Image: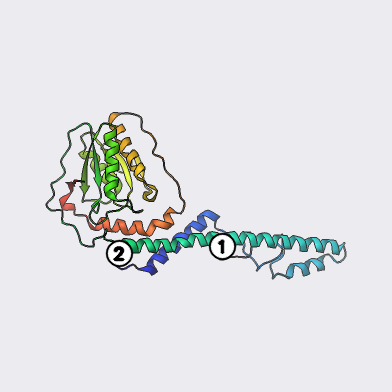
Amino acid sequence: MEVNEALVRQITEAVVRELQMKDYGGKSGIGVASRTAGDSGAGEKSGTAGGSGTGTKSGTAGSSIAAAGSDNGRGKNVGSVNAGSANDRNVNGSNKNVRNENSQIRNYWGEIITGVRAEEESDTVQPEKVDYSGYPQAKQGTDPKEVVIGVGAAFGTVIKNTITGIPLDKVIKAIIAGIEEEGMTARVVKNLKTSDVCFIGLEAAKLSGSGFGIGLQSKGTAVIHHKALYPLSNLELFPQAPQMTLETYFAIGKNAARYVKGEKVVPVPGTNDPMVRAKYQVKAALMHIRETDQLCPELNIIEWTV
């Protein structure tokens, strides 16, 4: 599939605008290199510390001289001009920071296009739909120590790496290792009727002999679920796939097993990056579309060997 760069650029710039309005409180100067440090954006490089100067660079000094003629005008004029000059320097410094921040945000555009192209051109993406008709249907588990891992329809076939390039075979092995370290057993099924991670996790939990399951999308998003909960009322949700590592997936497996044993779980460590959404939103959407395209509802859920 050929990358529609114009569409990707449009989406990216919309996200950038959203981030700017969110981070800077909607100030009109953001993104246009305005010559003001305030909210109004009035004037071009006005050298005023207050609100009286709205003209060009020289307008404030002239108005100050006129206003100060009969009352120690010289001293007040000098003070006003100096204040305007100092404020002008502050404004320039503020706008320089704004331009630097905008430049950093827009630098993510190149990374987005590079990532999308790599995804399209790599051999991990197969455009054809996979035929799962020969696979056995997933069975209801009876082992009380079992944790069922439900994976997305494109897992390991159409998509072989997470959104950040972690091989999915290593991801699933890390989760299984975490489960087995706690003395529990793991079984993997592939959900062909939904691409929503919470529903994948819930269906896995319903098939599990213990009632606990893990949902895993091919892009890397994960959830720990229980069969008695509503789809969106999960035990633990890990929505930011770009922040996930193999250590994270190992910890998810351990926590799922601890729920089975009724033991206290340990919060899974994570990081926070406010630019993740802008950087990966387009690629995440493309990967989710690929996953959804592989659905085959009539086959429901199948057993999957890793």
Residue 154 in the image: x percent, y percent? 24, 54
Asked if the residue under mark 2 is in contact with the one under mark 1, i.e. CB atoms within 8 Å, the reply is no
Identified by mark 1, the residue type is: Arg
SS label for mark 1:
helix
Res. 229 visible in picture: no
Q: Earlier in the sequence, mark 1 or mark 2?
A: 1
Res. 104 visible in picture: yes
Q: What residue do we see at 55% from left, 61% from top? A: 100
Q: Nearer the viewer, residue 180 or 101?
A: 180
As drawn, the residue found furthest toward the left would be 134
Residue 32 in the image: x percent, y percent? 56, 66
Which label lies toward us, 1 or 2? Answer: 2
Residue 99: assigned label: 1
Quadrant of the rendered structure where residue 37 is? bottom right
Identified by mark 2, the residue type is: Glu
Side of 224 relative to 10 (left or right): left
SS label for mark 2:
helix
Residue 184: assigned label: none
Q: What residue do we see at 85% from left, 64% from top? A: 74
Q: What residue do we see at 35% from left, 40% from top? A: 236
Kindly identify which residue carries mark 2.
121
